[in-house]
């Protein structure tokens, strides 16, 4: 995954092109607030998560190429070979250290990393957030852009359900959130405070996007939900 500072790899650029086909060719994705994503420098995209196509749709909607953190189980067979060729990042949920290290390298090179802070496909209301994105934000000096992904799963549909072709989807980018460790604040406390800020920003942004677009979140959170 070597790349010059600020210049995306050929693999992640190819992934961006493929994502655009998926988001706008297979499904009808409306993109809102893309101008809020900084045009240069390290950026984290923090998205809510309800369905299996959220990742590729987010990649296609983003104005910049994205290295997504994706559960390790997806990196098998032909799909796994494709994800590796597109420079996506596998996540071992029992030991995410390697994935976080790879994400930090991308940020230090001025790239973009996408992550689902909820950690699983479910209601997508961002009621919870894991600390991985917070660690990346604090250590990678990267602003966090909350992203609402709506329409990829409806109530009663399984988390692996593929929406019908040309279904209307929305990907909305919110205002960047900058988190920093304040002087004389412990690392643990800084993580707790930053994680709450990121979670709250994402939850509020998702709720505001639902209200603005009329696309609702699924009311159920299937027990089979799994994601990075």
Image: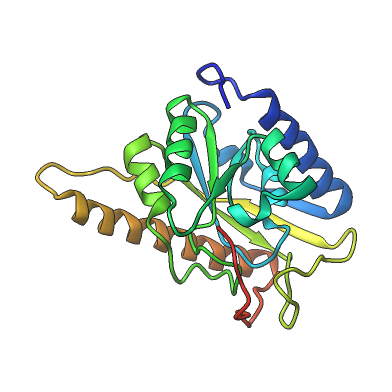
Its colouring scheme is rainbow
Q: Nearer the viewer, residue 155 or 84?
A: 84
Q: Is residue 188 left or right of residue 94?
A: left
Say which quadrant the C terminus sits in.
bottom right
- Outermost residue toward the front in this view: 77
Q: Is residue 123 above or below residue 196?
A: below
- Outermost residue toward the top in this view: 4
Question: Image point 69% across, 29% down: which residue?
Answer: 11
Give the quadrant of residue 196. Answer: bottom left
Q: Position of residue 156 (x, y in %)?
A: 73, 83
Callout count: 0
Give the quadrant of residue 210. Answer: bottom right
Say which quadrant the N terminus sits in.
top right
Q: Is residue 57 left or right of residue 102?
A: right
Q: Position of residue 116 (x, y in %)?
A: 54, 56
Q: Position of residue 188 (x, y in %)?
A: 20, 54
Q: Is residue 175 left or right of residue 157?
A: left
Q: Nearer the viewer, residue 55 or 148?
A: 55
Give the quadrant of residue 167. Answer: bottom right
Q: Is residue 187 left or right of residue 216?
A: left
Question: Image point 13% across, 49% down: which residue?
Answer: 185
């Amino acid at each position: 995954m070597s790349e010059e500072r600020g210049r995306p790899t050929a693999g992640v650029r190819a992934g961006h092109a493929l994502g655009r086909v998926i988001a706008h060719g297979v499904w009808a994705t409306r993109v809102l607030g893309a101008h809020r994503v900084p045009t240069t420098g390290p950026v984290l995209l923090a998205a809510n998560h309800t369905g299996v196509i959220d990742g590729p749709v987010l990649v296609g909607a983003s104005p910049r190429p994205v290295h997504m953190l994706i559960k390790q189980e997806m990196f098998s067979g032909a799909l796994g070979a494709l994800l590796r060729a597109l420079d996506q990042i596998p996540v071992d949920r029992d030991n995410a250290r390697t994935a976080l290290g790879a994400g930090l390298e991308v940020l230090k090179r001025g790239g973009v990393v996408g992550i689902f802070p909820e950690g699983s496909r479910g209601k997508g209301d961002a009621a919870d957030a894991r600390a991985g994105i917070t660690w990346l934000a604090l250590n990678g000096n990267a602003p966090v852009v909350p992203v609402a992904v709506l329409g990829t799963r409806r109530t009663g549909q399984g988390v692996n359900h593929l929406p019908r072709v040309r279904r209307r989807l929305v990907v909305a980018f919110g205002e960047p959130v900058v988190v920093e460790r304040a002087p004389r604040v412990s690392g643990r406390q800084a993580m707790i405070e930053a994680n709450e800020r990121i979670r709250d920003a994402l939850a509020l942004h998702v709720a505001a996007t639902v209200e603005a677009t009329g696309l609702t979140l699924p009311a159920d959170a299937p027990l089979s939900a799994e994601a990075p």
